[in-house]
Amino acid sequence: MSKHVATKKAKQKRSLGRIIVEVIAVLVCGVFFLVPFYFIIVNAMKTSSEATQLSITWPTEFRMLENIQEVLAARDHMLLLAFFNSTVITVSSIFILLIVCSMAGFVLHRRKGKAISIIGSTFLAGLMIPPAVVPTIWVLEQFHLFKTFPGIILVMVAISIPFSIVLYTGFIATIPKEIDEAAIIDGCGGFRLFFNIIFPMLKPIHSTVIILNAVQIFNDFVHPLYFFPGADNATVQLTLYNFMSMYNTDWNLLFTNVLLITIPPFILFLIFSEKIVAGMTAGSVKG
Amino acid sequence: MKVNKVYSYALLIPAGLIYGLLFLYPTIVSFFFSFTRWTLTDWEWIGLDNFRMFFEESSLMIGFKNTFIFAFLTAGLKVLLGMVIAVFLTSQMKTKRFIRSTVFFPVLVSTIAVGIAFSVLMHPSEGLINQTLALFGVSGPDWLGNPNLAIYSVALVDVWKGVGIATVIFIAGMMSIPKDYYEAHQIDGGNKVNAFWHITLPLSRPAINAVIILALIGGLRTFDLVWAMTGGGPGFSSDLIASIIYKQYQAGFYGLSTAGNVILFVMVAVIVFPIFKFLNRREVDL
């Protein structure tokens, strides 16, 4: 009996200990990972003079809507143009990636032999090799694609191909080969087999490829900087970078800009966080 | 039945063409152009001059050193911190979903946005970090203005942004370890600390390898975070090879910029490839 009471007490003690540990964990996590975002949000709501203090106090005067209007109107609605351009680049690149990488992944997984495994490793090498910058510009110029939408879109596709192919081959490995064989016996050729039967079965991995690339391409700064320069060619990350020198006194506007371009990935994260995590871990543990 | 005929190379052509033309071909010709003085329309062979310049100019050499420090420091910290957080989150915590999401979210935020936010937080006098330290009587350093410190400050921010991906990879690795191992260990009278060293750590090896390789590759190629936070400064103190490639490109030294690219390529090959081999060999031994 007394033993029973003792274990009960020990249990209570342990659960109290656990609660304390949890509270500390949440606090530490909050300080390190949430305060920076809180800082961005409150400062995006402040007036210019209040934001110069760079503090995390709640704004005395709520200016969020005015700040948003001002940021959107700045430099002849540059940010709106940037959102439009980035959307065009992201959507077109993903559309191309979806088709060319699923086709390639299918052949790379199903075909056997030395030649195909060399081709496969050549694609995989792209996960490691840093892109050669100036030579790429040189190639683009030969095709008159430098500083054009098709140029930047094709470059984004080229650098995203390796990872997307990894995702597709991994998924296609789970589709039984018997399905192919049945289709072949029914007289299907390679293209019909792929487009009519395999492609529709890839839906779950299509969505992973779409989401991961959307985040990557929308957030990309380096490639538009090199391959899509020019005033009319603004993309969201380049615009944000340029606003940094323009607004080095108006922190409220700079943070409003940061906040606006963080919203699209945040929405994707809210809806698809499980899918994003699964895609990133699957791809990396395999690669 | 000739199966290979169905899996036709034709399906590979679109991806191969784009990748070959805009990724492989530029990579291959970069080796040639790194030995030239190059204007995009015209080139002149100058042998090893570009590379000599890279290793003789202290402003270029420092990028070489920084890239090395940056890659290994960030990779090491991501493995260490990611492992601690992952162990924590695979225990029976009620708040683990919340913590995992908060730690992971920065992975999805744009690097430029993170760089801007932290260069403000790291402001020497007004910044939140030093203001907080002052509350505890510590006078914080000039994180980004001190040439000896700037590259380390940027590395810390890179860890902040990237530790989430290491964490989720570790969690995935740990979740795939069969529960029986832990039960058997417990029946044999082992404690939790031992279970970590003898079960969790060795069986998480593939995940650890993946994180090391990913972090090293990412670290060696980093450009945007440094560019947003310090622009390579003060002076050249926080330049990385990737930021030097950009600076030389902007200055119109295309051959020199391409030589930087080749050096980066060789660095990745020389550092990452042997480590990759080594790690995978250990994996087989187990």
Image (cartoon, rainbow, N blue to C red):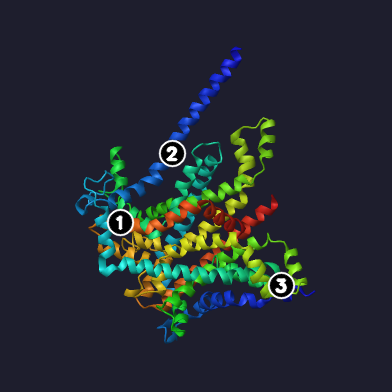
Left or right placement of residue A134 versus residue A126 in this view:
left
A230 lies above or below B139: below
At horizontal 40% and vertical 65% (from top left) the residue drawn is A221
CB atoms of marks 3 and 2 within 8 Å: no
Element type at mark 1:
helix
Residue B212 in which image quadrant: bottom right
At horizontal 58% and vertical 51% (from top left) the residue drawn is B208
Q: Quadrant of the N terminus of chain A?
A: top right
* Amino acid residing under circle 1: Thr
| Chain ID of residue with mark 2 | A
Write down the residue under mark 1: A256
Element type at mark 2:
helix
Q: Earlier in the sequence, mark 2 or mark 1?
A: 2
Q: Which mark is residue A114?
A: 3
In percent of width and height, residue B168 lies at: 53, 49
Left or right placement of residue A195 versus residue B68 in this view:
right
Write down the residue under mark 2: A26
Element type at mark 3:
helix
A82 and B223: which is toward the camera: A82
A210 and B180: which is toward the camera: A210
Residue at the extreme top: A1
B111 lies above or below A133: above
Q: Nearer the viewer, mark 3 or mark 2?
A: 2
A27 lies above or below A196: above
CB atoms of marks 3 and 1 within 8 Å: no
In percent of width and height, residue B165 lies at: 51, 52
* Amino acid residing under circle 2: Val
Left or right placement of residue B156 versus residue B83 in this view:
left
In percent of width and height, residue B145 lies at: 30, 55
